[in-house]
Image: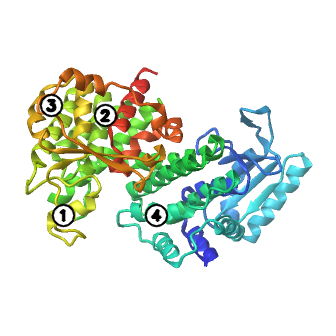
Amino acid sequence: MLERIVEHWLTRAGERSYEIAFAQLLLAEGWRILHGPVHHPYEHGKDIAAVDPDGRLCGIQLKDGDVSLADFEKYQGQLTALSRTAITYPGIEPPRLPDRVLFVTNGVLTPPARNRIEALNSANRGMQYPSVECVEREQLVGRFAGAQSKFLPQELRDVSSWLLLALGDGNARFPVQKFGRLLEDVLSETAQKPLDTERALASAVLVTAQSVDAWQRTSNHLAVAEAWLRLAAAILHTSERTSLDAPRWKPSFDMTLRMARESLSSLFDEATTGQDLLVPDPVDGIIYPARALLVCGYSAAWYLSSVIDNSVTPDTSDRLRRLLLRELPFVKLIGESQFPHMAAVCWALENLGERDRANQLIGSWLVGLAKANQPEASSAVADPYHPVEELLRRAIGAEIDEPDETFDGHAYTAHVALDWLARRGIRAPVAAAWRNLTKVTLCEFDVATPRGYLTDVDDAGTLRMWHLPLTGSWRQLTDASRVAVAPELLPKTLVAVPQFLPFVTLLFPQRLVTNIAKLMDANLSRGQTS
């Protein structure tokens, strides 16, 4: 059955869909990826440059679908460049020709195309250039299935979940929570040897590529991004849990994050080229505010990630400013699980020179939440453990699991907003909210270990609750807000890749706590001054 699933996916997958999976397949087989998959004018025919398990330098070109003679004639220039151009990479000194050249397709080669490759190889051998080795769909199916078979979930329930994803139609929002459980199953048995963990991570990437393919083909950019981001978090969590060395997990992570950021770039382009956001739903008045915040939040997080790694461009900054200012008037928060998206927007506004607007939004949230969640309030805002899909169902009176659940008297994000404002010296909204805040129980979930920040479930953690005093000291608030986070409280893997930090709380809204907010401020400050 596994081979049938893989073959079904490969038959439908485009070049961009399966190339990341092929790179991970190489990692699972013991190859070392030097660079790629890449697409730019300077690749000289090489989508991937790698070193095989025997230490041979390899250049790899990937194509999509069956290859006829006419198709091959279009690719021949790339393959010639691949065979006859030196590979340059730190550590490859001096730059030299590849030892092996691979031409990979998820389809099949026609006999005339194979004959032309044989002729090309005869010429290459005569001039002492490497021959072109062909890898076709049948070989790929066997290799992908072999790489995944050890780590895929064995229970029928889990396989069924994977099948529902792999065979989905791609029109709905990607089921991130269900997919997260599938990744946990794939990565649960990874504590034996570092090599096993490394290969399990590569297998998880293959599962993700297959699971998200339907959404990839419908250009559902947000769904694709959420899937790859969820995998990136799982890679960091698993590597933290197993104390895996960075060289073993970072190649998989880097490729995964790049796929997510490319999808978010496409989402950003789509959002900024129109006059508004397309919402294919008849209940537009309810859906649009949530959709606007979702798109703005992810666009802002993508921008912030680029700020942290110093790759943002002036054009991106200008376009994001226009998008946020265009959509913010339509945004309305109906639950605390949406606050991380608003926080991402506010961090972005700060970096775009709109500090007053950012502080006004955070201040409004603090004042509004403190008022809405007073004890015995009938319309209290739901806590961050309730996703936006449930909030929308509540709003239209649809069936939900716990219809009688109440949220009055508690708040999980009020103290984060309070800390934000105190750290920036913004006193007025704090004073306006204080009386109501003293009547609300403030809540924060303390993870049991640092890796708890990278998952939505931490059974060993504890819920901390407290009340503010009736009269508070502004000096004490500001001093506490500016105390740096102790490094031992943070996941080492996350600290190693701060460009992922803006996405953590969008995936896990309950993880937007004081420590994470302070870490964001610190990293953005470094990004601005670097």
Cα distance between the residues tagged 4 and 2:
30 Å
Cα distance between the residues tagged 2 and 3:
19 Å
Look at label 2 and name its amino acid. Answer: Trp
Task: Return the residue at label 3.
Answer: 430
Q: Which of marks 2 and 3 is nearer the N terminus?
A: 2
517 versus 423 height, above or below: below
Q: Which of marks 3 and 1 is nearer the N terminus?
A: 1
Are the residues flagged by discs 4 and 3 in contact, CB closer than 8 Å? no
Rendering coords of residue 155 (x, y %): 54, 76
Task: Return the residue at label 1.
Answer: 405
Cα distance between the residues tagged 2 and 1:
32 Å
At a point 22% along the width and 60% down the height, the residue shown is 391
Tell whether 103 sits left or right of 472. Answer: right
At label 3, counting other C-alpha atoms closer than 10 Å, the crowd grade (few under 14, some 14-19, many 20 or more) is: many
Rendering coords of residue 221 (x, y %): 40, 55
Label 2 sits on a secondary structure element that is helix
**Outermost residue toward the right?**
126
At label 1, counting other C-alpha atoms closer than 10 Å, the crowd grade (few under 14, some 14-19, many 20 or more) is: few
At label 2, counting other C-alpha atoms closer than 10 Å, the crowd grade (few under 14, some 14-19, many 20 or more) is: many
In the drawing, what numbered circle is on residue 181? 4
